[in-house]
Amino acid sequence: MTGSRFLVPALAGLLGLAGSLLATFSLYRAASTAVDRVLEERLRGAGETAAGMLATDDLASADLHSVVVANGLEGAYLVSPSLLVLADASGHRGRRADLLRTDAARVERAARGEATVAFAFAIGDAPVATGYFPVRGPDGSLRAVLALEAGQAFATAHRGLRRALGVAIAVSVLGALALGVVARRWARSEAARRREAERAIRGDALARMGAMVAHEIRNPLGVIRGSVELVRARSGAGLPPDDREALQDVLGEADRLRTLTDDFLDLARDPSIAPSSIDVIAVAEEAARSLGRTHSAIAVRVDGAARAHADPARLRQVLSNLLVNAAQAGAGNAAVRADAEGGRARLIVRDDGPGVDPALRPRLFEPFATGRAEGTGLGLALSRRIVERQGGTLRLRDDLGPGAAFEVTLPLARD
C-alpha cells in the first residue's frame, strides 16, 4: 500500500511533464520552421530589390550601407565571379573575398543567374541567413553578384521563440512537481477511505487527476500559441500564403492538443454530445486526413454511404482513435466502410495489422487495458462511451478475417 501511495504521484507528475513537454517541443519545431521560411523570404525580397536598384548604378560607388540599414542586415557586398570585392558596405573593396565569409559555390551559381538564400552559419545558437543574387545590366549581362548577410534583426524572432520555449519548459516542470505533490496528498487521503467505496473514489480521483493534467498541458500550449500569434502579427501582410498556412497549422495543432485534454476528462464524466444529421463518410474522410498528417505510413480507404444522427466531432474522435490504434499496431492499410443495416447507420473499420491479442479481448474496452507498453488504454474505453451516449454501439468483430475490425452503429438521420 505504501508503494502505491508513492507510485501514483510519481506517475501523475510524469504524465503531466511528458504531455506538456511533447506539446511544447512539437509546436516549437513547427513554429521555428515557419519562422525560418518567413526570414528567408524577407531576405530574398531585400536581395532582389537591391539587385534591381544596382542594375544601372556605378558599382564602385554603390551605396550598400543604405541597403544594410534599410533591411536590418549584418553586411552587404558586391563580388565578381572571380571573387574580387567590387564594393562593400564596410567600405573595403578591391581585394579578394574572404572564403570564410563568402560561399564560392553559391557565388558561381548566382553568376549563372540562380539566386540562393540559405542559413549558412550561426551567431551563438541563432542561425544566420545569407543570400547571393545576380546583378544584371540593362542589356541583361552579369555585372556582379550581390551578397547579403542577415543581421541581429533577423534573429529576434528566434530569440523570442527560444524564450517562449524556456518559459514553457519551466512551467511544465513546475506543473509536474505541483501535480506530484497534489497527487501524493490525494493518494494519502484516498488510502484512508473504506474499501467498499473504492470504485466511486477511483472515478472521482480520475476526474481530479484529469483536470490537473489538462491544466498543466494547457499552460505551455498557451505560451507557444501566443508566440506563434506574435510572429504572425509582426510579419503583417508581407507573410507569404504558404507561411501563413504553416503558422495556421501550428495553431490548429495547439487546438487539437487542447481538445485531447478534454477527452481525458470525459473518462470520468459524461462526454458532451451535440447530435445532428451528418454524412458519416465525410466525417470518416476528415479522420483519415488527420491520420495522414501524423501516421503517413498507413493508407486509409473510405467508401460507402450513410447518414446518421450523431455528433460529428465526437464521431470523428472515435474514428481517429480506431485508425490511430491500427497505425500504432503496425498496419499498412485500413478501410472504413459505411452503410445502413437494420435501420441503423453502420461503420466498419478494418486494418491488416496483427489483430487483437485474445488475452486482451475480455478487457478491451476497459480503461487502461492495452497491449502496447507505451499505450494508455483510454482510447477504446472513451470511444465506446461516446458512441453509447449517442444511442449507438461499438464492438470488436471477429468474423471479418485477419487484422482487427470494429463496428460502430448509430441511429439513422431523422431527415
Image: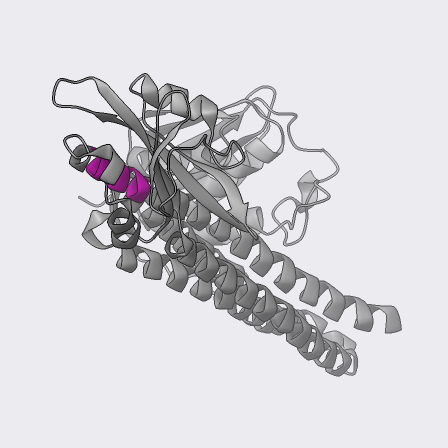
Asked whether residue 220 is drawn in magenta, I would say no
Secondary structure, magenta segment, majority class? helix
Place residue 286 in its image quadrant. top left
Outermost residue toward the left in this view: 138
Left or right: 190, with 28 as reference point: right
Residue 329 to residue 268: above or below: above
Q: Nearer the viewer, residue 268 or 125?
A: 125
Residue 83 to residue 244: above or below: above
Left or right: 374, with 305 as reference point: right
Residue 389 visible in the shown view: no
Asked whether residue 48 is drawn in magenta, I would say yes
| Residue for point 79% across, 83% down | 192
| Residue for point 65% across, 51% down | 376
| Residue for point 46% across, 22% down | 105
Q: Nearer the viewer, residue 267 or 84?
A: 84
Q: Nearer the viewer, residue 381 or 125?
A: 125
Residue 411 to residue 389: above or below: above
Labels in figure, total? 0
Residue 101 to residue 28: above or below: above
| Residue for point 46% across, 55% down | 257
| Residue 214 place in picture, x, y as percent | 52, 66
The C terminus sits in image quarter: top left
Image: magenta residue range: 41-51
| Residue 256 place in picture, x, y as percent | 42, 52
Residue 376 visible in the shown view: yes
| Residue 60 place in picture, x, y as percent | 26, 35
Outermost residue toward the front in this view: 94
| Residue 180 place in picture, x, y as percent | 70, 73
Place residue 172 in its image quadrant. bottom right
Q: Nearer the viewer, residue 228 or 200?
A: 228
